[in-house]
Image: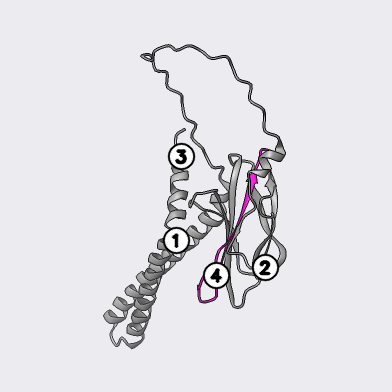
Amino acid sequence: MEVRPLDELLSFLQRYEGWIYLLVGTGVLVYIRRSLQAWSEWRNALFGLEREHAQRKLSTSLTMLALLGFLILGEFLMVSFVAPAIPQSSALATPTLDLLATATATLPPVIASTPTSSSIQATLAPQTEGCTPGVIEWNSPRPGETVSATIELKATINVPNLGFYKYEFAPLGSEEWTTIAADNQPKVNAMIGAWNTSALVPGDYQLRLVVADNQNNPFPACVVQVRVVSP
């Protein structure tokens, strides 16, 4: 399946989210400093040419600040809202016919027993990581729970000096996390949003809560394992 340009863009923005914020934030600081210098020069200018030159520098700095602000806003919107709403594409392997292969005898078909839902559920061991009850934890879904379609997400985010939190998902064993949404309000066993699993390939997934204080110091991420099935 051909990878869409939008998928590549979203993957790039998610993979380098931290670096993008760092680089754009550095640019913001640089142009804030230049704006203040230009403002000071404009106020202290004695001649018309000096004031005109300082005004041009100030206008340029403010324009760059506005542009960088739009870049930060665009990054946040794309990662937090657009990416979760785009169905993920999955490539299917195409079988290749080997014309040179030597024919072999065909064995009688073996009828394999179909695993029951209870045996499937047993293979998913409930697992959590980094969660602290009453502080940072998932209340719904529970570890090992089977989910489908759109589900409500309930969690507790009750830490001192909360800065923000975001919640993400990834296939089990993968580090390619997809952000669902983010917020900055404390929650205690309350709904924080919804997760639409309809477009996902059925299988085992991880849900992760990433919480930071108002100094941007992260708490241990809270991760639970769930199973996604077809609606």
Where does the image place residue 61, in percent across and percent down from the top left?
36, 71
Viewer-side residue, 140 vs 55 = 140
Query: Of marks 4 and 1, which one's residue comes earlier in the chain?
Result: 1
What's the distance in space between the residues labelled 4 and 3, CA to CA?
Answer: 35 Å
What's the distance in space between the residues labelled 3 and 1, CA to CA?
Answer: 22 Å
Query: Of marks 3 and 1, which one's residue comes earlier in the chain?
Result: 3
- Mark 3 and 2 residues: CB-CB less than 8 Å, in contact? no
Q: Could you say whether the residue bearing mark 3 is in a helix, strand or loop? A: loop
Which residue is rendered at x = 36% and y = 86% of the image? Answer: 43
Query: Of marks 2 and 4, which one's residue comes earlier in the chain?
Result: 2
Q: What's under tag 2, amino acid-wise?
A: Pro
Circle 1 is placed at which residue position? 71
Where does the image place residue 222, in percent across and percent down from the top left?
59, 62
- Mark 3 and 1 residues: CB-CB less than 8 Å, in contact? no
Q: What's under tag 4, amino acid-wise?
A: Phe
Q: Give neighbour class at mark 2: few <14, some 14-19, many 20+ (Cα, 10 Å).
A: few
Magenta range: 209-231
Query: Of marks 3 and 2, which one's residue comes earlier in the chain?
Result: 3
Query: Of marks 4 and 3, which one's residue comes earlier in the chain?
Result: 3
Give yes or no for residue 215 being in the magenta stretch. yes
- Mark 2 and 4 residues: CB-CB less than 8 Å, in contact? no
Query: Of marks 1 and 2, which one's residue comes earlier in the chain?
Result: 1
User: Viewer-nearest of labels 1 and 2?
Assistant: 2
Q: Is residue 150 above or below residue 139?
A: above
User: Viewer-nearest of labels 3 and 2?
Assistant: 2
Circle 2 is placed at which residue position? 133
